[in-house]
Image (cartoon, rainbow, N blue to C red):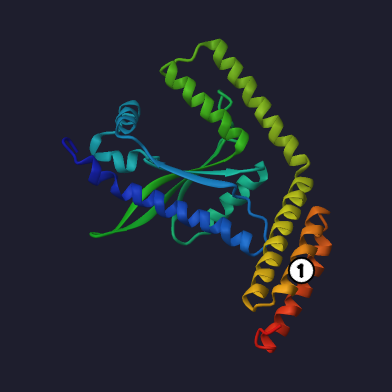
């Protein structure tokens, strides 16, 4: 691979990252659309820099002509979750997918590293459709909570600063910080249902508000200006009172008004 064209070499990995990001984000959107709990908070991805690939190939003694199989995280996807239990649920969802092949898994949550690092890693093989045909590429999917990701980001920055030679006092403080982050995750998990219920209430309220406003706007389209204005005033009052039940009842009334407007050809 001496003198290789790195731009061409990395193209399939860039394609894999973009496709996997779209698919995993779509999974979250689909669950939300079905009013189901979505364990995925957000998804990011990146392709390893050439300098990082070369450094890792030297560290792992991977020959240049074996980089494609010897370095598994050239394509990297990171999935953030709110709760530790969500991590395992997302991992199971990925296992069940038919558009990729699971190679192996590394559970750094149950078996966390000495540094305190916690995350769940999936090594997958993903087929990229190129102009030359299907090309399987290896990719690493990391699944973490937001607290785990915050810790890992700080640790990565410090390792870069100290060139992977962290002073012992810094290592010890990081280990303590990792324990504190995991304690926070466990505490949030213990009050999980209340958090989820609050989020669902907020989302339900947002949906009702959007629906009522759209319905009132439709009345204006039918030129039912007076009726629409009356509904708008009632909406404003209910919104100020944070009366979700009243907004739901208002939606029913506006829908009935829309039916009447449709039957009457839209004339007041």
Q: Position of residue 245 (x, y in %)?
A: 83, 62
Q: Quadrant of the N terminus?
A: top left
Secondary structure beneath dot 1 equals helix
Quick one: label 1, few (<14), some, or many (20+) residues within 10 Å? Answer: many
Give the side of residue 92 with respect to residue 201, left or right.
Answer: left
Query: Which quarter of the figure has residue 129?
Result: bottom left
Asked if residue 163 is positioned above or below residue 70 in the image, the reply reads above
The residue lying toward the viewer, choosing from 102 and 24, is 24
Give the farthest residue toward the left: 3
The residue lying toward the viewer, choosing from 220 and 127, is 220
The residue lying toward the viewer, choosing from 217 and 126, is 217
Q: How many marks?
A: 1
Mark yes or no: residue 46 visible.
yes
Q: Position of residue 265 (x, y in %)?
A: 65, 88
Query: Which quarter of the figure has residue 72?
Result: top left
Query: Which quarter of the figure has residue 267?
Result: bottom right
Give the side of residue 150 with respect to residue 257, left or right.
Answer: left
Asked if residue 201 is positioned above or below residue 159 in the image, the reply reads below
Q: Quadrant of the C terminus?
A: bottom right
The residue lying toward the viewer, choosing from 12 and 246, is 246
Judging by the rendered image, the residue that carries numbered circle 1 is 231
Q: Position of residue 165 (x, y in %)?
A: 44, 15
Task: Please report the residue visible at 72 percent of the width from the left and 71 percent of the height from the top.
Answer: 228
Q: Position of residue 89 (x, y in %)?
A: 62, 51
Mark yes or no: residue 118 visible.
no
Task: Please report the residue visible at 71 percent of the width from the left and 61 percent of the height from the top.
Answer: 209
Task: Please report the residue visible at 70 percent of the width from the left and 57 percent of the height from the top.
Answer: 206
């Amino acid at each position: 691979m001496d003198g290789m064209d790195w731009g061409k070499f990395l193209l399939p990995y860039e394609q894999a990252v973009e496709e996997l990001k779209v698919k995993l984000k779509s999974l979250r959107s689909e669950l939300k659309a079905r009013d189901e709990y979505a364990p995925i908070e957000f998804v990011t991805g990146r392709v390893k820099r050439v300098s990082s690939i070369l450094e890792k190939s030297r560290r792992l003694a991977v020959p240049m002509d074996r980089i494609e199989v010897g370095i598994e995280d050239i394509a990297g996807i990171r999935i953030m979750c709110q709760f530790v239990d969500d991590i395992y649920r997302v991992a199971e969802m990925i296992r069940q997918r038919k558009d990729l092949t699971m190679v192996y898994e590394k559970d750094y949550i149950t078996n966390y590293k000495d540094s305190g690092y916690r995350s769940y890693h999936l090594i997958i093989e993903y087929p990229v459709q190129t102009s030359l045909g299907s090309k399987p590429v290896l990719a690493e999917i990391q699944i973490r909570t937001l607290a785990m990701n915050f810790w890992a980001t700080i640790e990565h920055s410090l390792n870069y600063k100290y060139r992977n030679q962290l002073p012992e006092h810094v290592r010890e403080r990081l280990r303590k910080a990792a324990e504190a982050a995991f304690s926070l995750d466990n505490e949030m998990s213990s009050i999980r249902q209340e958090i989820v219920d609050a989020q669902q209430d907020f989302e339900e309220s947002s949906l009702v508000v959007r629906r009522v406003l759209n319905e009132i706007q439709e009345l204006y389209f039918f030129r039912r200006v007076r009726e629409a204005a009356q509904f708008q005033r009632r909406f404003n009052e209910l919104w100020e009172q944070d009366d979700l039940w009243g907004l739901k009842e208002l939606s029913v009334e506006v829908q009935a008004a829309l039916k009447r407007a449709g039957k009457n050809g839209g004339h007041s």
